[in-house]
Amino acid sequence: MADHRTDGGEARAGAEDRRMTTREVAERLGVKPETVYAYVSRGQLSSRRGPGGRGSTFDAREVDALLRRGRRETAFGGETAIRTGITLIDKDRYYYRGVDATALAERYTYEEVADWLWTGRLRRGTRFTAPHDALIAALRAVGSLPSHGGPADRLRVAAIAAAAADPLRFDLSPQAVLGTARGLIPTLVDALPAAGPLPREDGGGPLPRRLWSRLTAQAPDEASLRALEAALVLLIDHDLAASTLAVRVAASARSHPYAVVTAGLGVVESPLHGAASGLAHRMLTEVLERGSAGAVVADHLRGGRRVPGLGHRLYKGPDPRATALFARLEAVPAAAGALAAAREVEATAARHVPLHANVDLALAVLSVSAQMPPEAGETVFAVARTAGWIAHALEEYGERPMRMRPSGEYSGPTPPQPLP
């Protein structure tokens, strides 16, 4: 990778002359080698023959620029990127509408940032309240689920029940969608079963405090609530992640906001996406029980498994969400043990490969230190990301409908074939 932080002209020249093989480019961009050549054919990358005329090589600076522009192949309607003005990820930082997301998490509440992201106006003291009929329907539906149901099950059922209680759900005008969003997010939180005593102002108090009581029976301190609030803001959006892409497809087909959120919740349950923090939670618990990260990391590697909570394909350096959340957790006395365990995991795994902690590991520190279940991080992720999904739905409703209709590349038997 080109390094522009060198001191001498000779070092800079070496960095600028850095060439990458097709395989290296494919791994860097997270695509197949065939897609690399598609970028060349579209003029997005230039190539030249390698030494001895074997294979193609690529300018590392061009590859980095392509990655920063987010020009990832999607094959939706022939487009190579989906226009969005919500989140930019650039140079190991990320921004909501051009504002540093970690700075927003330092100064504002989740509800304030979510409403600002939707409307462009920051209103101090913004609070979301669940509509009575929607909440009653969601509580009944969630209460009918078996006890072993996971957080994604409960949230999906709550969203579907709230939709059934809203006869105006098909109104896709911006104001109607905003009204739906401001009622849906607290409905999702308040419909979850309580893990401990509910706050006295439940139903109208700060959203993080209401969510906390659904995640653990442990009483919260102010530092822990601030950490949870920060996590919610930091996780609102992250460009076109898998669940957000599903949301854009649903919104392109003009699904109503409840259905759009349900589409996102269907993807969040993946262990490669929203449920990843649960794996990190279990790993940290084991590290604390065994007293050392070395043996736990070795067990993961011996079993052919990745070490949870490390690395992110969009960041060469530390995940800024993890950095910001770790900083908040340092002010939580009960988090000291889990935080030290996470640091040890990161240091142990980085001895051979420079991997940094990602937000899943930071979420795991929060859930372990507060005696939450392993699935708590998934719940936090899903509730937080709902605000981002609504922002993307509002954006997509302004595009031409059904634009995300890819064409399949048929690979079956050549017709005509005999009847089966």
Image (tube, helix red, strand yellow):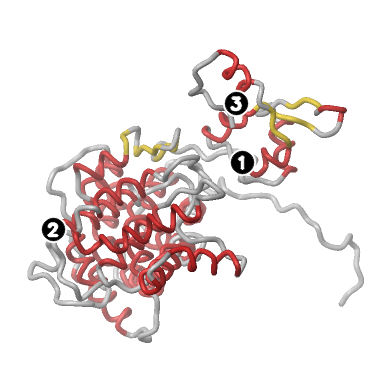
**Which circle marks residue 368 in the picture?**
none
User: In the displayed structure, does residue 120 sit left or right of residue 309?
Assistant: left
Q: For numbered disc 3, what is the local secondary structure?
A: helix
Q: Residue at x 19, y 44 (%)?
A: 108
Quadrant (top left, top right, bottom left, bottom right) of the N terminus = top right
Residue 63 x, y percent position in the rendering: 62, 31
- Identified by mark 1, the residue type is Arg
- Identified by mark 3, the residue type is Arg
In terms of depth relative to the viewer, which is nearer, 143 or 325?
A: 325
Quadrant (top left, top right, bottom left, bottom right) of the C terminus = bottom right
Single out the residue that lies furthest toward the top. 9
Picture layout, residue 240 above or below residue 284: above
Picture layout, residue 78 above or below residue 10: below
Mark 1, Cα crowd under 10 Å, few <14 / some 14-19 / many 20+, is some
Residue 414 x, y percent position in the rendering: 89, 60
User: In the displayed structure, does residue 69 sit left or right of residue 202?
Assistant: right
Q: Marks 1 and 2, Cα distance to the nearest angstrom?
A: 41 Å
Q: For numbered disc 1, what is the local secondary structure?
A: helix
- Indicate which disc, 3 or 1, sits on the residue closer to the N terminus: 1
Residue 114 x, y percent position in the rendering: 27, 48
Q: Residue at x 70, y 46 (%)?
A: 32
Q: Marks 2 and 3, Cα distance to the nearest angstrom?
A: 46 Å
Residue highlighted by disc 2? 222
**Which circle marks residue 61 in the picture?**
3
Q: Marks 3 and 1, Cα distance to the nearest angstrom?
A: 12 Å
Residue highlighted by disc 1? 28
**Does the CB distance between marks 3 and 1 fall below 8 Å?**
no
**Does the CB distance between marks 1 and 2 fall below 8 Å?**
no
Mark 2, Cα crowd under 10 Å, few <14 / some 14-19 / many 20+, is few
